[in-house]
Amino acid sequence: MTTNADPSAAQPPPRPRRRAPAGAAVLREDVTEAIRAAVFEELAAVGYARMSIEGIARRAGVGKTAVYRRWRSKLHLVLDLVSAVAVQGLPAPDTGSLEGDLRLLYEVTSRALRHPVAGQIIPDLQAEAARNPDIAEAMQKALSKGQQSVATGIVAAAVARGEVREGVDENLALDLISGPLYWRSVVVRAPKLPKGYLEGLTRATAAALRAL
């Protein structure tokens, strides 16, 4: 006489849960942001050539391992930060007039470029870009991508309002909008803009765009 076997007896024993490997731990965002902030401070303090992972970790209040879990080297760290700047870009002005948009853009940009940290970091990274093509490419994207999208938006809005003719050369417009302030703030590194400079630059740039 046969008996029915207990179905549960044929089931394999449950497998123990596998622990996630240590390397798969979720990276804390607050630690990542602390490291990013420390990189900017370290760049401004000692420059790219003298900057080290040890110095970044010490300034961020973390161990070197926390930095290396996120970036392989200081080059990759800086490239990531510069690329993030390009993605963030600048806010697109929408004041309702060409002069108003240009004036607002210049106010925001001048404050950013003349910030003590930016004043140290940008020239230093430009010098490194002359020796490192990876940094050169990242810098080119960071300094042009954000500005280009904003400049294109300003020109497109001006065209829609009839302030600038259609078919304007966008690259030339970008040079006219971004070039003078960048030259004075970053290349010449004037400690202070002359009184009325932004107003005059706004009028001159608007007139140049209308003449294109």
Image: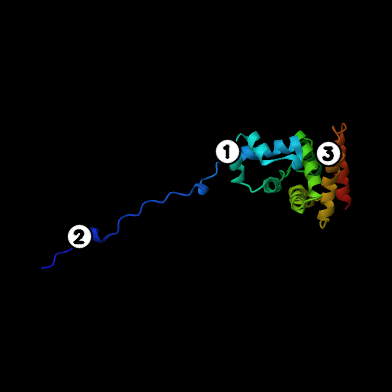
Q: Is label 3 in a helix, a strand or a loop?
A: helix
Q: Is label 1 in a helix, a strand or a loop?
A: helix
Q: Position of residue 10 (x, y in %)?
A: 25, 61
Mark 2 or mark 1: name the one nearer the start of the chain.
2
Q: Nearer the viewer, mark 2 or mark 1?
A: 2
Q: Which residue is mark 2?
A: 6
Which residue is located at x 79 percent, y 36 percent? 114
Q: Position of residue 150 (x, y in %)?
A: 75, 48
> Does the rendering let one see residue 120?
yes
Q: Nearer the viewer, residue 59 or 117?
A: 59
Q: Nearer the viewer, residue 164 or 75?
A: 75
Kindly report the distance in space between the C-alpha atoms of the residues bearing marks 3 and 2.
Answer: 83 Å
Q: Position of residue 208 (x, y in %)?
A: 88, 48
Q: Residues within 10 Å of mark 3 (few under 14, many from 20)?
A: many
Q: Position of residue 158 (x, y in %)?
A: 79, 49
Kindly report the distance in space between the C-alpha atoms of the residues bearing marks 2 and 1.
Answer: 54 Å
Q: Amino acid at mark 3?
A: Ser
Q: Is label 2 in a helix, a strand or a loop?
A: loop
Q: Which residue is mark 1?
A: 30
199 relative position to 58: left or right:
right
Q: Which residue is mark 3?
A: 185
Q: Residues within 10 Å of mark 2 (few under 14, many from 20)?
A: few
Q: Nearer the viewer, mark 3 or mark 2?
A: 2
